Image: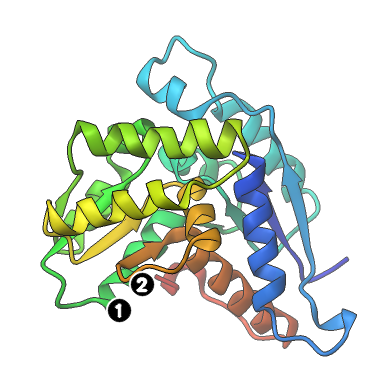
Amino acid sequence: MKKFFTVLGGMGSLATESYVHLLNERTPTEKDQDYLDYILVNHSTVPDRTAHILDHSKPSFLPPLVEDIKQQSLLKPEFMVLICNTAHYYYKELQAATDIPLIHMPHMAISVMKKKYPKAKRIGLIATKGTIADHIYENEIKDAGFEYSLGDQAVQDQVESLIYDDIKIKGKVDANKYYDILQTMHDKFDCDVIVLGCTELSLAQEKAPDHPYNVIDGQGIIVDKSIEFAKKIRRGEKIDFTKIY
């Protein structure tokens, strides 16, 4: 297979399944051959990202992801996407392990947000404790020139419950809990736009999109960009991956 891309997933598997579902659903097709060519690496045994970020004595997720990237690089994909926001904690180290472009999902998400909501005053960020602790999205939002809010401990507890108790453990999305989180960030913390800084939250958005709030879904955005890049590559167009953000 030539002119394909690699999806580094499995963190978690339901979020990765959501990415693949949206990828296939949003790709314009009339026949089998219109779908995109890609390899999915569903590496579900990668150590917990948040646990390591909060306590470096816990197993690191960097070595297995570097191994995945090196293995895939031998196959020469055109680009790679990493379907886990929290894993971008080691983005520089992961990109340094290959010459293949690795799309930076948080940077891409905030780049799109800045264009879509240029007049937003305050951005809400909901994510795992690991993503909050590593400041990836926080720094991206500040660098884009926006004020931001992380909510409070009550919001964080709800977010963690939705991600871990409902999605990762039960395999279900609690739509009412998701809506409550968005409403609180909007009403109590005056957030014009809410960034979904976890792919499990992206799954919640896919399964429960019927709400009035402005959200930036990093996984949904990387789906659209994957399609855009893959279609250009199939047509033989050259992409300068240093200028995609």
Residue drawn at 17 percent across, 60 percent down: 191
Residue at the spot x=62%, y=59% of the render? 19
Image quadrant holding the N terminus, namely bottom right
For residue 18, what is the image quadrant?
A: bottom right
Which residue, given by chain and number where applicable, does mark 1 sit on? 116
Whole-percent x and y of residue 94? 53, 41
Disc 2 marks which residue? Answer: 112
Towards the viewer: 11 or 152: 152
Residue in the image at 76% along x and 73% along y? 36
Drawn side of residue 38 relative to residue 148, left or right: right
Q: Which quadrant does the C terminus fall into?
A: bottom left
Badge 2: few (under 14), some or many (20 or more) residues near its Cα, within 10 Å? Answer: some
Q: Position of residue 44 (x, y in %)?
A: 69, 33
- Judge whether 193 appears above or below 153 on screen: below
Disc 2, disc 1: CB below 8 Å? yes
The disc at residue 59 is: none
Q: Nearer the viewer, residue 181 or 51?
A: 181
Amino acid on which disc 1 is placed: Lys
